[in-house]
Amino acid sequence: MIDENLKVLISYRLRQADESLKAGKTLLKERLYNSAVNRAYYAMFYAVLALLASEKRETSKHSGAISLFDKEYVKTGIFPKGLSKWLHNAFDLRQRSDYTVSYEPSAEETEETLNRAVSFVQQVGERLKAKMEEKER
């Protein structure tokens, strides 16, 4: 049986991911590429935090969350290496977009990052759903 507080936390993180994706899509339509990339990355980050919560693990640092995702979910074969690459690329692009003066990602880069974030969140969500159902048995 899974703890009710844990369910609430996982659900909250997944809602954050979904909201970030919706915001990212709106920002992309408005050609606000820096902000759209930021939201795409955060959608992935929140999905990773939901995964970590499901294992009763947590970190407040982005590098720690990414590292744990790679170690616990990619190196073990739960998720393909491509998802790790997407997460790392989104993180790097977000860093450049948020902190490099006069840098703006292209429309294509932004759209690709957002599409990858949608797929990433979907795959993590499916994994969590299966895991939660298994723990409920």
Image (spheres, rainbow, N blue to C red):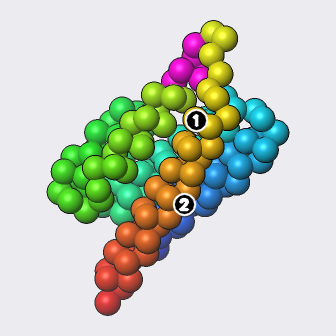
- From what the image shows, is residue 97 above or below residue 117? above
Q: Is residue 1 visible?
A: no
Q: Secondary structure at mark 1?
A: helix
Q: Determine the residue located farthest toward the left in the rendered image.
A: 76
> Horizontal and vertical percent for residue 108?
62, 37
Magenta region includes residue 98: yes
Residue 14: numbered disc: 2
> Horizontal and vertical percent for residue 42?
55, 42
Q: Determine the residue located farthest toward the top in the rendered image.
A: 101
Q: Which comes before the other along the chain, label 1 or label 2? A: 2
Q: Is residue 132 visible?
A: yes
Q: Which residue is mark 1?
A: 109
- Asked whether 18 or 11 is in front, the reply is 18
Q: For the residue carrying disc 1, how many other residues have a C-alpha within 10 Å: few (<14), some (14-19), or many (20+)? A: some
In the figure, residue 29 lies in which quadrant? top right
- Asked whether 132 or 97 is in front, the reply is 97
Circles 1 and 2 in contact, beta carbons < 8 Å: no
- From what the image shows, is residue 111 above or below residue 105? below
Secondary structure mostly taken by the magenta-highlighted segment of the chain: helix
> Horizontal and vertical percent for residue 86?
42, 43
Give me the residue at 43% from left, 51% from top. Answer: 49
In the figure, residue 104 lies in which quadrant? top right
- At label 2, which amino acid type do we have? Leu
Magenta region includes residue 115: no
- Tell me the distance, in whole angstroms, between the alpha carbons under discs 1 and 2: 24 Å
* Numbered label tally: 2
In the figure, residue 87 lies in which quadrant? top left
Identify the magenta region. 95-100
- Asked whether 15 or 2 is in front, the reply is 15
- At label 1, which amino acid type do we have? Glu
- Give the mark toward the camera: 1 or 2: 1
Q: Quadrant of the N terminus?
A: bottom left
